[in-house]
Amino acid sequence: MALQVGDTAPDFKLYTSDLTEISLSGFKGKKVIIHFFPMAFTGTCTEQLCTMRDNFSYYEGINAQVIGISVDSPFSLAKFKEVQSYQFPLLSDFNKEVSAAYGAFYDEFVFGLKGVSKRAAFVIDEEGKIAYAEVLEDAHDLPDFKAINDALSA
């Protein structure tokens, strides 16, 4: 069953692109925007995260934490973060457990690739509850950034 607004967000521990382990529960008391994306260095994924990068001061100004998650290795994510100058952590869900827990997971993707994160966006409130959930079936589609911002200001 898909995660819904009001559900408790599944906690996780993942490694960042700089090999630091962080957990969702470590951000309790702060709003968190989680962006799942299929693959680093691809067009729509870059556009999705660059939108967050370019509006980062807004999120920082309301004390909201932005996180990007994909099944890429931490080493690929480190290069992606460096090239695109992202100010927020990119987390490696290499074992695919978090993507699956959030319902943001393709069993089979393009080119016969198996086990790839779907493009998705979640807003988690200060108490760890889901305030916004969007999982996209078409990897070419972008999340609704206005709806994300509306959920953050609610």
Image (spheres, rainbow, N blue to C red):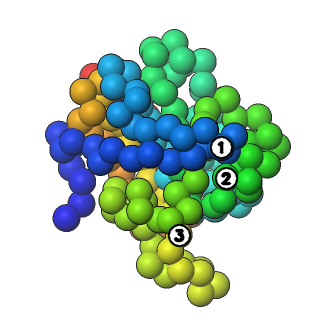
* Mark identifier at residue 19: 1
Question: Residue placed at 52% from the left, 57% from the top?
Answer: 93
Disc 3 element: strand
- How far apart marks 1 and 3 lie (CA) works out to 21 Å
Mark 1 is on which residue type?
Answer: Leu
Which label's residue is closer to the chain start, 3 or 2? 2
- Residue 39 in percent (x, y) is at 63, 62
Please give the residue where the numbered disc 3 appears in the rendered image.
Answer: 116
Disc 1 element: loop
Above/below status of 124 relative to 61: below
User: Is residue 39 toward the left or the right of residue 128 in the image?
Assistant: right
Q: Quadrant of residue 8?
A: top left
Question: Residue placed at 54% from the left, 41% from the top?
Answer: 21
- Which residue occupies the foreground of this view, 25 or 99? 25
Please give the residue where the numbered disc 2 appears in the rendered image.
Answer: 74
User: Is residue 72 toward the left or the right of residue 66 in the image?
Assistant: right
Q: Are marks 1 and 2 in contact (CB under 8 Å)?
A: yes
Which label's residue is closer to the chain start, 1 or 2? 1
Which label's residue is closer to the chain start, 1 or 3? 1
